Image: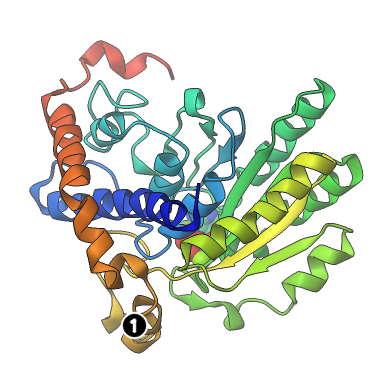
């Protein structure tokens, strides 16, 4: 693939995620969506760039802000909308909602609302892969807030000691709900990771599709070839409120200017030509997926106690 078509395919995937989440925003006031939503608008290139380097049999353990990784890893869109609507044809028959997305068939597993909780699961799964002499790799994605969770440190230590093929992927939007990093962290993350003997990679340009793809490839290749853990931190920006479809600049914990700096660099906003090229095709797919959700039945009473 040449550079241009590479850019376009990454753009397409990222725009698809953004338009899905913009559709969620549009639908939210109608009460069709039965689930709290943590939107990735502004952060799409992280999921797209990383997943563009993954194979079908690689696994991603996502968190509650998971729509982007779910879609980028190949999770089906109709079942996502049905799940958000609490419908029977949803991924988990409407019982999981936005915060607990999973599609094992597509290598997406383990979304949870508890910050950091799926990190150790990914390490355990990677250990299994190693014991079974498989060649696939495992990615655990989490926010900068999870860096303060004990489980991350236990998982880093275990992964380093046992040399398991896991990529620790930190989506650093600088915020945990309303708290910026400088109020929360006394440590320097690169030194900390290196103290475990784990290579540390970082990407500042989390808005740029080609940079994210190419630089994350280095970390992923390291894990794949060495069968050892690596840590990748990608700087990004959350445009919307922590949870919900709106904006919360009035809350006073960050400024609109700070986000505008990222928006000025965001190809999904600034590259109008490529946006227009793909808009209709993606919108048609989204409208069909929404109809699938709307037309899916609600679970029956008997479904209440199944699969639980
Ligand atoms: C163990 C735990 N502590 C606190 C919370 C409340 N909480 C939910 S999301 C969140 C912020 C996490 O921030 P970060 O990891 O940076 O992810 P982001 O939301 O920015 O993507 C917190 C504190 C929780 N869900 N789980
Ligand atoms: Mg964060």
Residue furthest out toward the top: 302
Image quadrant occupied by the C terminus:
top left
Residue 4 place in picture, x, y as percent = 43, 57
Please identify the quarter of the rendering in which residue 130 is found.
Answer: top right
Image spot of residue 230 (x, y percent): 76, 53
Most extreme residue toward the left is 30
Residue 262, quarter of picture: bottom left
Does 236 sit left or right of 14 as displayed?
Answer: right
Q: Is residue 148 left or right of residue 181?
A: right
Q: From the viewer's perspective, is residue 99 above or below residue 201?
A: above
Q: Residues within 10 Å of mark 1 (few under 14, many from 20)?
A: few
Taking the image as drawn, is residue 20 in sight? yes
- The residue at the point 76 percent across, 71 percent down is 190
Q: Is mark 1 within 8 Å of ligand 2?
A: no
Residue 142, position as x, y percentages in the image: 57, 54
The residue that appears at 50% across and 46% down in the rendered structure is 1
Which residue is nearer to you in this view: 4 or 106? Answer: 4
Name the residue beneath numbered marker 1: 260
Q: Residue at x 22, y 45 (%)?
A: 282
Q: What colouring method underlies this structural image?
A: rainbow
Count of numbered badges drawn on the protein = 1
Q: Quadrant of residue 204?
A: bottom right
Q: Is residue 150 visible?
A: no
- Residue 170 appears left or right of 178: right
Along the line of sight, the residue nearer the viewer: 57 or 109: 57
Helix, strand or loop at disc 1?
Answer: helix
Q: Could you say where residue 237 lies in the image, as x and y percent from the top left?
A: 44, 71
């Amino acid at each position: 693939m040449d550079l241009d078509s590479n850019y376009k395919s990454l753009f397409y995937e990222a725009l698809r995620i953004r338009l899905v989440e913009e559709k969620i925003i549009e639908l939210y006031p109608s009460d069709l969506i039965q689930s709290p939503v943590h939107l990735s608008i502004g952060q799409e290139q992280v999921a797209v760039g990383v997943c563009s380097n993954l194979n079908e049999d690689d696994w991603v353990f996502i968190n509650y802000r998971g729509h982007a990784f779910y879609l980028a890893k190949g999770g089906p869109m109709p079942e996502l909308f049905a799940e958000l609507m609490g419908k029977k044809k949803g991924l988990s028959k409407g019982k999981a909602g936005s915060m607990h997305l999973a599609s094992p068939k597509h290598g997406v597993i383990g979304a949870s609302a508890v910050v950091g909780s799926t990190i150790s699961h990914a390490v355990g799964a990677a250990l299994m892969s190693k014991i079974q002499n498989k060649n696939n790799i495992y990615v655990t994605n989490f926010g900068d807030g999870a860096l303060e969770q004990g489980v991350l440190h236990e998982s880093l230590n275990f992964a380093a000691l046992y040399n398991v093929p896991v990529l620790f992927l930190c989506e650093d939007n600088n915020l945990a709900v309303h708290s910026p990093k400088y109020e929360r962290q006394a440590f320097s993350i690169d030194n900390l990771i290196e103290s475990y003997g784990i290579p540390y990679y970082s990407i500042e340009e989390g808005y740029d599709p080609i940079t994210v793809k190419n630089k994350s490839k280095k970390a992923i290749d390291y894990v794949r070839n060495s069968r050892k853990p690596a840590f990748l931190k990608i700087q990004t920006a959350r445009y919307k409120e922590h949870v919900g479809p709106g904006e919360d600049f009035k809350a006073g914990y960050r400024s609109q200017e700070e986000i505008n700096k990222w928006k000025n660099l965001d190809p999904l906003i600034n590259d109008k030509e490529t946006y227009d090229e793909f808009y209709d095709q993606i919108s048609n797919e989204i409208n069909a997926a929404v109809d699938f959700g709307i037309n899916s039945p609600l679970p029956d009473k008997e479904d209440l106690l199944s699969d639980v």
